[in-house]
Amino acid sequence: MPGPDLLSSQGLRLDGRRPNELRRIRCKLGVFTQPDGSAYLEQGNTKVLAAVYGPHQASKSKRSETVVVNCQYSMATFSTGERKNRPRGDRKSQEMSLHLRQALTAAIKTELYPRSQIDIYIEVLQADGGAYCASVNAATLALVDAGVPLRAYVCACTASMAWQDGDPAPLLDVGHVEEAAGGVVLTVASLPSTGSIALMEMSHRLHSDYFESVLSRAMQGCRDIEVNIT
Amino acid sequence: MTEHVSIRLASERVNHCVSSSNDTPRFYTPGEVISGMQDFMRGHGTYVEEDCLKSSVAGVMQKVNKLICVRPLKSRYVGEIGDVVVGRVLEVQQKRWKVETNSRLDSVLQLSSVNLPGGELRRRSAEDEQMMRKHLKEGDLISAEVQSVFTDGSLSLHTRSLKYGKLAQGVLVKVFPSLIKRRKNHFHNLPCGVSMIIGNNGFIWISPKPQGMMVDGNEDEIINYEMQPVDSTDREIIARLKNCIAALVASKMMLDDTSIMFAFEESLKYEEVKELLDPEAMLDIAFLTQHRLNNIMEE
Amino acid sequence: MAGVLLSRTEKVFIIDGVKDEYRSDGRSTIDYRPMELETNVVSHASGSARLRLANTDILVGIKTEIDVPKPDKPALGKIDFFVDCSANATPEFEGRGGEQLANSISNMMQRAYQSPQAFDLKQLCIFEGKQCWKLYVDILILECGGNLCDAVSLAVKAALFNTKIPFVKAALMDGGNIDLQLSDDPYDSKLLDVGSAPLLVTLCKIGNKCVVDPTAEEEKCSSVSLIVGVTGNRKYYSDDDTEELPAFQPKCSAISMHGPGSITTTTLRNAINQGIIAAVCLDEALGKTVVRERRDIEKFKRHSYGFLK
């Protein structure tokens, strides 16, 4: 299944990175004053803002023994190449909200705060591939900024598969062009310091023989991101 | 009549960093191993996994004997008994008020832990329950003391002292609770002529100095007293203090009466209070205040 | 507006302060808080700007599309405003919570830009009756600390100033259809003439006086507020100072009232005058800032600050 040419003959990718290279990550904590915690993260050209409110008193209907994690993923209408009509509420962003919640709940020490709620809001300002990963990473930073107890950092990263001279060469941190080329995209959110996976998702087909190598590359990416943002 | 409008570019942004003299302490982040040893007690901000004590927040470690805590740099207010807080009434319920104090859960003020008009030794009747809204209603600000902490972390407050109770005219400034320095006294009558309550929960109340006790007056007199317009000198000092606190907060400096007073004195060289909204002036004040604090430390 | 709760005595303090012309941060009734502006922050958009006024934070992105003009106005282009209240600003905006506020702001902007003296839609025309540019002005509210309308209008004007529209290289006529070839070179593009674009000024009636640039607390104390849209002066937005421009007269392009209270006609007239004066000052400050930024960029390559630093 040799896909489109994602690697040049020199072994470089379309944007000039090596297969195991991340895009440049830059971030800042505490960009806003109103939320309890906020963070801004740039991963290449993908730019994400995250804000955390809480932990605060949960509304009466939602009270439980553990903290309620509430996520909302929203994309600015000008964030993509083609203008989006609605910033949120479509099926994709609802799914994203759900996945974010899943990955972040795994990290938050939910048992500490009964009857409370944490609101996490993500705003994607510019999407250039890997918006989910950047969102997870930004949300983690915002949670750290808010002083919410976490088991560990959650980091997310994507990986894809390319071929070089017939050998498999897994690609790390897939950009928009590579995403659009139609290859496999494997998204992993993990707690790198413990090595456990909080969420994994894959699109397109991939031979199970290569699954391990792609997964390990994505996990490596998570670890690299962790080193980067701590 | 000229308008004051200033628009600066992002490239001219002021960096609010003010270096303090003391070294930066060791900084822990979530998931980081603090100690592999067993003979420690697990405090706030830490957890045990695989026989290791790990940090769960990003902050500085504090060690008391064997108890290890990591205090996050910024978080909601975590109450301790005896703390002075400033809070806002959110809801009037049966026999109690719900009060917002910037902590994780709403705090509670029981009807039995307030001083009702008419003295301390009085039975609380059913009538009092119906009069609760007259005493404190939604939106009112109070100063109070933390009486106890419930198991779920929510706070129970009391105002059973003359210094606590409903707050009249003034300005509320909200800052991060971690910027408040714990002191013996949080009620200050500043030499510049206004009074200030630095709540442990990060709510700072600045108000004109009270003109004598108003406790024994009847309801109408109290209301009249509360509605008296504040004179313009007090108003200017309050505005100046508010802007000074904002300047210190922008540079992430610890707040107590000393640092705020220093900032106030340094700010006097700016004649107009509104000049203090300018980022350069804010940085200047924070810098000068830090300088004076360092001088004190050396002495 | 975002859920700010105030006690009665705090309101009295603010209202008395306005009466004394001395607000709780030392400003008089006609002063604005300091602002910070950066343009060209979103690379996916044709033009963008971010404006921060105290802790009100607005990000505007402008996208261009080719559209068919309305049959009754064949020579005019289109401009469309969309406001999104991000939940980052306050949890109340989660889901559809901010929609009402968003709609009222976007309607206000739409109305202020409708007049041909405010914004000339002819410059968006490509081929009369057949094709025109449509500008999508997307406004994202990231944090609110009062005075949203003014901040939005300033950010929109700065973003429009920054907007680049590609040149049309060739047009092929094929029966009734037109096939356009656009220039791919990002430098081969034209800028819009936005000098006259309107700015909105909110005047909050507190007590018997009107204040500009209200904080969230002050907005809570006022029963009624007046929003005035005032056209801008081209002079402040042109690069060369020699160009002869007709004498400038600020004009109101939209007025609206918000809130449950009422205003007497004299107060209204005074408020409108006050709003026009404020708008002229804002316009001058904004024009100087954006022109200065453009000159800076020409001189040396500047890197984008955005939310970093």
Image: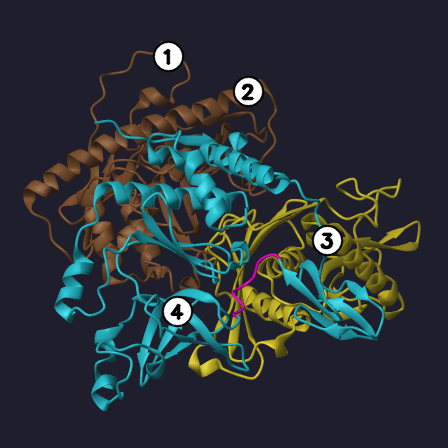
Chain colours: A yellow, B cyan, C brown
Q: In this view, does B158 lie to the left or right of A94?
A: left
Confirm whether circles 1 and 3 share one chain: no
User: Which amino acid does the dot numbered 2 rest on?
Assistant: Glu
Image vertical order of residue C241 relative to residue B119, above or below: above
Whether labels 3 and 2 belong to a single chain: the reply is: no
Mark 3, mark 2: which one is toward the viewer?
3
Q: State the image coordinates of residue C85 (x, y, percent, origin top left).
A: 41, 55
Name the residue that disc number 3 marks: A230
What is the distance, in whole Å, between disc 4 and disc 1 at their CAs? 62 Å
Secondary structure of the residue carrying numbered label 1: loop
Q: In which quarter of the image is the N terminus of chain B?
A: top left
Chain label for disc 2: C
What residue does disc 4 label? B144
Left or right of A85 in this view: B217: left
Question: Callout 1, which amino acid?
Answer: Asp
Instruction: Please give the range of residues in magenta.
Output: B73-79
In x, y percent, where is residue B40? 78, 73
Q: Which residue is drawn at 33% across and 77% down?
A: B114
Foreground disc of the pair 4, 2? 4
Chain ID at mark 4: B
SS at badge 4: strand
**Mark 1 and mark 3: span between their CA atoms?**
51 Å
Q: In which quarter of the image is the C terminus of chain B?
A: top right
Identify residue for label 2. C298
Q: Is residue C258 left or right of residue A7?
A: left
- Mark 1 belongs to chain: C
Q: Which of B233 and B9 is in front in this view?
A: B233
Between label 4 and label 3, give the one nearer the viewer. 4
Q: What residue type is labelled 4?
A: Ala
Chain that bears disc 3: A
